[in-house]
Amino acid sequence: LILTRLAPQAGCLVLVAWAGVHPFMYAQQKNLEFLLESVTIIGGLLILLTSERAIATRERLLSGGGGVLGTPAEQKEAQANEKNQLLFAGRLMLCAVFVYYSVKMSIERVQALLGGPINHEDPIHALFALFVLLLLVSGTGLIIVGIKSRWCAMGLALVMGCAALYKHPWFITMWSSNSFKLDFVVGYEDVQVDAWLYSDHQRYFFFQQLSTVGALLQLVAHGPGQFSVDEADAESITITSITSKGAD
Protein backbone atom coordinates (compact mmCIF):
# COMPACT_ATOMS: atom_id res chain seq x y z
CA LEU A 1 0.00 0.00 0.00
CA ILE A 2 2.85 2.41 0.77
CA LEU A 3 5.31 1.41 -1.95
CA THR A 4 2.66 1.22 -4.66
CA ARG A 5 1.06 4.51 -3.47
CA LEU A 6 -2.38 2.89 -3.55
CA ALA A 7 -3.24 3.87 0.02
CA PRO A 8 -0.09 5.02 1.85
CA GLN A 9 -1.91 6.36 4.91
CA ALA A 10 -3.77 3.08 5.37
CA GLY A 11 -0.48 1.23 4.90
CA CYS A 12 1.15 3.31 7.65
CA LEU A 13 -1.72 2.56 10.04
CA VAL A 14 -1.57 -1.17 9.28
CA LEU A 15 2.17 -1.20 10.00
CA VAL A 16 1.65 0.78 13.21
CA ALA A 17 -0.86 -1.84 14.36
CA TRP A 18 1.48 -4.68 13.36
CA ALA A 19 4.45 -3.12 15.16
CA GLY A 20 2.29 -2.77 18.26
CA VAL A 21 1.05 -6.37 18.43
CA HIS A 22 3.88 -8.47 17.02
CA PRO A 23 6.03 -8.56 20.22
CA PHE A 24 3.07 -10.25 21.92
CA MET A 25 2.52 -12.59 18.97
CA TYR A 26 6.10 -13.83 19.30
CA ALA A 27 5.98 -14.02 23.12
CA GLN A 28 8.57 -11.24 23.49
CA GLN A 29 6.45 -8.98 25.71
CA LYS A 30 8.99 -9.43 28.53
CA ASN A 31 11.85 -8.42 26.25
CA LEU A 32 12.05 -4.71 27.04
CA GLU A 33 14.58 -3.98 24.28
CA PHE A 34 12.36 -5.66 21.69
CA LEU A 35 9.27 -3.78 22.92
CA LEU A 36 11.04 -0.42 22.78
CA GLU A 37 12.40 -1.19 19.31
CA SER A 38 8.77 -1.61 18.27
CA VAL A 39 7.93 1.78 19.84
CA THR A 40 10.83 3.31 17.89
CA ILE A 41 9.52 1.79 14.65
CA ILE A 42 6.04 3.17 15.40
CA GLY A 43 7.64 6.60 15.87
CA GLY A 44 9.18 6.40 12.41
CA LEU A 45 5.85 5.33 10.93
CA LEU A 46 4.12 8.32 12.54
CA ILE A 47 6.67 10.63 10.91
CA LEU A 48 5.98 8.95 7.57
CA LEU A 49 2.22 9.20 8.18
CA THR A 50 2.63 12.93 8.78
CA SER A 51 4.28 13.34 5.39
CA GLU A 52 1.64 11.24 3.65
CA ARG A 53 -1.19 13.24 5.22
CA ALA A 54 0.43 16.49 4.10
CA ILE A 55 0.77 15.17 0.54
CA ALA A 56 -2.86 13.99 0.51
CA THR A 57 -4.08 17.36 1.80
CA ARG A 58 -2.07 19.26 -0.80
CA GLU A 59 -3.39 17.05 -3.61
CA ARG A 60 -6.97 17.47 -2.39
CA LEU A 61 -6.66 21.26 -2.30
CA LEU A 62 -5.05 21.37 -5.75
CA SER A 63 -7.90 19.30 -7.16
CA GLY A 64 -10.45 21.67 -5.67
CA GLY A 65 -11.53 19.37 -2.86
CA GLY A 66 -12.67 20.71 0.47
CA GLY A 67 -10.55 20.79 3.58
CA VAL A 68 -11.43 21.39 7.20
CA LEU A 69 -14.04 24.03 8.05
CA GLY A 70 -12.91 27.63 8.37
CA THR A 71 -11.08 30.24 6.38
CA PRO A 72 -8.04 29.21 4.31
CA ALA A 73 -5.76 30.69 6.98
CA GLU A 74 -7.52 28.70 9.73
CA GLN A 75 -7.35 25.53 7.64
CA LYS A 76 -3.63 26.01 7.08
CA GLU A 77 -3.01 26.63 10.79
CA ALA A 78 -5.04 23.57 11.84
CA GLN A 79 -3.18 21.34 9.38
CA ALA A 80 0.18 22.72 10.51
CA ASN A 81 -0.69 22.08 14.17
CA GLU A 82 -1.76 18.51 13.43
CA LYS A 83 1.40 17.88 11.42
CA ASN A 84 3.68 19.28 14.13
CA GLN A 85 1.93 17.32 16.89
CA LEU A 86 2.33 14.07 14.97
CA LEU A 87 5.97 14.83 14.19
CA PHE A 88 6.64 15.59 17.85
CA ALA A 89 4.99 12.36 19.02
CA GLY A 90 6.88 10.39 16.38
CA ARG A 91 10.19 11.99 17.35
CA LEU A 92 9.70 11.15 21.04
CA MET A 93 8.71 7.55 20.28
CA LEU A 94 11.68 7.28 17.93
CA CYS A 95 14.02 7.79 20.89
CA ALA A 96 12.47 5.04 23.05
CA VAL A 97 15.01 2.28 22.41
CA PHE A 98 17.94 4.72 22.60
CA VAL A 99 16.80 5.94 26.02
CA TYR A 100 16.77 2.26 27.04
CA TYR A 101 20.31 1.75 25.72
CA SER A 102 21.47 4.90 27.51
CA VAL A 103 20.03 3.80 30.86
CA LYS A 104 21.33 0.24 30.45
CA MET A 105 24.85 1.38 29.59
CA SER A 106 24.82 3.95 32.42
CA ILE A 107 23.96 1.23 34.92
CA GLU A 108 26.80 -0.92 33.55
CA ARG A 109 29.26 1.98 33.92
CA VAL A 110 28.15 2.60 37.51
CA GLN A 111 28.52 -1.11 38.30
CA ALA A 112 32.02 -1.04 36.86
CA LEU A 113 32.95 1.91 39.08
CA LEU A 114 31.46 0.29 42.18
CA GLY A 115 33.12 -3.07 41.59
CA GLY A 116 30.17 -4.85 40.00
CA PRO A 117 30.18 -7.91 37.73
CA ILE A 118 32.05 -6.09 34.94
CA ASN A 119 34.73 -4.45 37.10
CA HIS A 120 37.52 -6.57 35.58
CA GLU A 121 37.06 -5.29 32.03
CA ASP A 122 39.94 -3.96 29.99
CA PRO A 123 40.59 -0.20 30.55
CA ILE A 124 40.55 0.48 26.80
CA HIS A 125 37.19 -1.26 26.50
CA ALA A 126 35.91 0.74 29.49
CA LEU A 127 36.97 4.05 27.93
CA PHE A 128 35.44 3.10 24.59
CA ALA A 129 32.18 2.10 26.29
CA LEU A 130 32.12 5.44 28.14
CA PHE A 131 32.75 7.29 24.87
CA VAL A 132 29.90 5.43 23.16
CA LEU A 133 27.61 6.16 26.12
CA LEU A 134 28.35 9.88 25.93
CA LEU A 135 27.67 9.93 22.19
CA LEU A 136 24.45 7.96 22.65
CA VAL A 137 23.12 10.16 25.45
CA SER A 138 24.00 13.39 23.66
CA GLY A 139 22.60 12.20 20.32
CA THR A 140 19.36 11.00 21.88
CA GLY A 141 18.98 14.19 23.88
CA LEU A 142 19.55 16.36 20.80
CA ILE A 143 16.90 14.43 18.86
CA ILE A 144 14.38 14.83 21.69
CA VAL A 145 14.81 18.61 21.90
CA GLY A 146 15.27 18.95 18.14
CA ILE A 147 18.82 20.29 17.83
CA LYS A 148 20.69 19.00 14.76
CA SER A 149 18.21 16.13 14.89
CA ARG A 150 18.66 15.11 11.25
CA TRP A 151 22.42 14.69 11.68
CA CYS A 152 22.00 12.86 15.00
CA ALA A 153 19.42 10.53 13.47
CA MET A 154 21.74 9.82 10.55
CA GLY A 155 24.58 8.98 12.95
CA LEU A 156 22.38 6.68 15.05
CA ALA A 157 21.09 5.00 11.87
CA LEU A 158 24.66 4.19 10.79
CA VAL A 159 25.49 2.82 14.26
CA MET A 160 22.31 0.72 14.39
CA GLY A 161 22.97 -0.67 10.92
CA CYS A 162 26.48 -1.74 11.89
CA ALA A 163 25.22 -3.12 15.21
CA ALA A 164 22.61 -5.23 13.41
CA LEU A 165 25.33 -6.77 11.23
CA TYR A 166 27.49 -7.45 14.28
CA LYS A 167 24.85 -8.73 16.72
CA HIS A 168 22.74 -10.79 14.34
CA PRO A 169 25.00 -12.31 11.63
CA TRP A 170 22.41 -14.80 10.37
CA PHE A 171 24.05 -14.77 6.93
CA ILE A 172 27.14 -16.38 8.53
CA THR A 173 25.65 -18.76 11.09
CA MET A 174 23.19 -20.24 8.58
CA TRP A 175 26.10 -22.13 6.96
CA SER A 176 27.42 -23.50 10.24
CA SER A 177 27.14 -27.14 11.35
CA ASN A 178 27.32 -26.19 15.05
CA SER A 179 24.50 -25.73 17.52
CA PHE A 180 23.87 -22.43 19.33
CA LYS A 181 22.08 -21.08 22.40
CA LEU A 182 19.16 -18.73 21.83
CA ASP A 183 20.61 -16.31 24.37
CA PHE A 184 18.99 -13.26 22.75
CA VAL A 185 15.42 -14.66 22.83
CA VAL A 186 13.66 -14.06 26.14
CA GLY A 187 12.39 -17.34 27.62
CA TYR A 188 14.73 -19.49 25.53
CA GLU A 189 18.15 -18.38 26.81
CA ASP A 190 19.37 -21.90 27.69
CA VAL A 191 17.86 -23.68 24.70
CA GLN A 192 20.41 -25.21 22.32
CA VAL A 193 19.28 -25.34 18.70
CA ASP A 194 20.66 -26.21 15.28
CA ALA A 195 22.27 -23.53 13.14
CA TRP A 196 19.31 -23.18 10.74
CA LEU A 197 16.85 -22.45 13.59
CA TYR A 198 19.32 -20.15 15.32
CA SER A 199 19.86 -18.27 12.05
CA ASP A 200 16.11 -18.02 11.52
CA HIS A 201 15.76 -16.21 14.85
CA GLN A 202 18.84 -14.10 14.15
CA ARG A 203 17.38 -13.05 10.80
CA TYR A 204 14.15 -11.93 12.46
CA PHE A 205 15.98 -9.81 15.05
CA PHE A 206 18.31 -8.48 12.35
CA PHE A 207 15.43 -7.08 10.30
CA GLN A 208 13.70 -5.84 13.44
CA GLN A 209 16.79 -3.78 14.27
CA LEU A 210 17.14 -2.73 10.63
CA SER A 211 13.59 -1.39 10.86
CA THR A 212 14.79 1.05 13.53
CA VAL A 213 17.30 2.29 10.97
CA GLY A 214 14.42 2.96 8.59
CA ALA A 215 12.55 4.78 11.37
CA LEU A 216 15.55 7.04 11.99
CA LEU A 217 15.85 7.77 8.27
CA GLN A 218 12.24 9.00 8.30
CA LEU A 219 13.37 11.73 10.69
CA VAL A 220 16.32 12.49 8.40
CA ALA A 221 13.99 12.77 5.40
CA HIS A 222 11.08 14.70 6.93
CA GLY A 223 12.65 16.70 9.75
CA PRO A 224 11.70 17.16 13.41
CA GLY A 225 8.73 19.49 12.98
CA GLN A 226 7.96 22.86 14.50
CA PHE A 227 8.17 21.59 18.09
CA SER A 228 11.96 21.56 17.90
CA VAL A 229 14.76 24.06 18.40
CA ASP A 230 15.98 23.75 14.80
CA GLU A 231 12.73 24.56 13.01
CA ALA A 232 11.53 27.01 15.66
CA ASP A 233 14.74 28.99 15.13
CA ALA A 234 14.31 28.77 11.36
CA GLU A 235 10.78 30.18 11.59
CA SER A 236 11.97 32.95 13.91
CA ILE A 237 14.68 33.91 11.40
CA THR A 238 12.14 33.88 8.55
CA ILE A 239 9.69 36.08 10.45
CA THR A 240 12.47 38.51 11.40
CA SER A 241 13.60 38.68 7.76
CA ILE A 242 10.06 39.36 6.50
CA THR A 243 9.52 42.02 9.20
CA SER A 244 12.79 43.71 8.29
CA LYS A 245 11.85 43.79 4.59
CA GLY A 246 8.46 45.25 5.49
CA ALA A 247 10.13 47.96 7.55
CA ASP A 248 12.43 48.79 4.66
Image: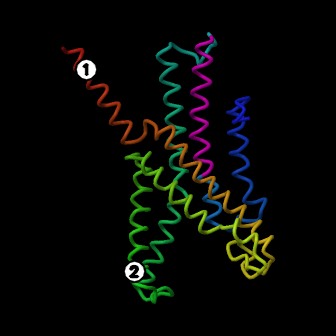
Which comes sooner in the sequence, label 1 or label 2?
2
In magenta stretch: residue 246: no
Which amino acid type corresponds to the residue marked 2 in the rendered image?
A: Ile
Q: What kind of secondary structure does the magenta stretch mostly adopt?
A: helix
State which region is magenta: 41-63
Mark 1 closeness class: few <14, some 14–19, many ≥20 residues within 10 Å: few
Name the outermost residue toward the left. 248
- Residue at which label 2 appears: 124
At mark 2, the secondary structure is helix
**Quarter of the C terminus within the rendering:** top left
Rendering quarter of residue 32: bottom right
Seen at 77% across and 65% down, the residue is 200
Seen at 71% across and 37% down, the residue is 11
| Gap in angstroms between the C-alphas marked 1 and 2 | 55 Å
Q: Is residue 77 left or right of residue 198?
A: left
- Residue at which label 1 appears: 243
- Residue 9 pos. (x, y %): 68, 33
- Residue 169 pos. (x, y %): 66, 67
Compared with 101, 6 (above or below) is: above
